[in-house]
Amino acid sequence: MQKALQPTGKKKSSLSRSSLAKTAQFTVTMVMAPKDGPKDTQVFQITVSGVKGRLDYKDKALGEVRYVVNEKGAFFFIPANKAAQKMNLKIEDGLSTVFAQASEVLAGAQKTGKATVAGIACDVYKNPRTGSVVYLGTTPGFTLPVKLEIRNAGGMQTMLASQIKLNGSIPEALFALPAGTQIIEGQGGPAGLPGSR
């Protein structure tokens, strides 16, 4: 008789700058596939180097947008407007928002095994109440969720990190705002980040 897999306790996710290597570039693709509606896909390009970070995605209302954290502060940049609002946020705020749903699943999940996804070694966690599954990276330099699967009566939602490059060379220019960008001082915080829809 085979011994049943014993739960190892619930997992708490901590998404911080230390979850990533000194430099990291990767793509996060989120797909919402409701049973009674069109599929919605959102793609985030994430780049981190030291204390600098950049998050690019397409907003349905604004078009191409970018969050940039550099030595001058943190900015929400809209290329079409050539304007950037200075914000009160850190790299952790962006990571926490992009991976918010995976973190919610992890909060009530139990470890069920191991797998490799997108070249990253992962521990697999399943929420016994909902059946949702998170593949949490264990590879040094990438201890973030790599894959998420949520199924319910309304349909399915997935998240996948891909094109993961760790400890590579990243040009400093990626973290600079284009010359001539109008800076708008503001008190904005992470509430405006993507994923809070």
Image: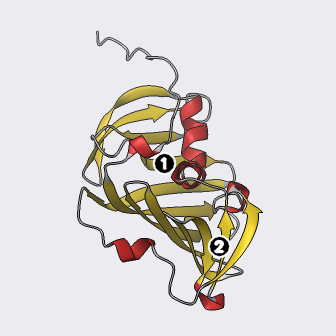
Residue under label 2 = 38
Looking at the rendering, in which quadrant would you find the C terminus? Answer: bottom right
Please state the horizontal and vertical placement of residue 131, each as a whole percent of the image: 55, 36
Q: Quadrant of residue 84?
A: bottom right
As drawn, is 87 to the left or to the right of 139?
Answer: right
Q: Is residue 183 above or below residue 107?
A: below
Q: Quadrant of residue 135?
A: top left
Q: Residue furthest right?
A: 187
Q: Residues within 10 Å of mark 2 (few under 14, many from 20)?
A: few
Q: Earlier in the sequence, mark 1 or mark 2?
A: 2
As drawn, is 176 to the left or to the right of 190?
Answer: left
- Of the two numbered discs 1 and 2 in the rendering, the one whose residue sits closer to the viewer: 1
Question: What residue do we see at 54% from left, 63% from top?
Answer: 31
Residue under label 1 = 148
In this view, the residue in front, 64 or 51, is 51
Instruction: Kindly state the secondary structure of the residue where label 1 is placed.
Output: strand
Q: Is residue 140 above or below residue 117?
A: above
Q: Residues within 10 Å of mark 1 (few under 14, many from 20)?
A: many
Q: Is residue 194 above or below residue 156?
A: below
In this view, the residue in front, 27 or 68, is 68
Q: CA distance from mark 1 to mark 2?
A: 20 Å
Q: Residue furthest front?
A: 72
Please state the horizontal and vertical placement of residue 54, each as a whole percent of the image: 47, 66
Residue 79 marker? none
Amino acid type for the residue under numbered disc 2: Pro
Please state the horizontal and vertical placement of residue 97, each as a whole percent of the image: 60, 52
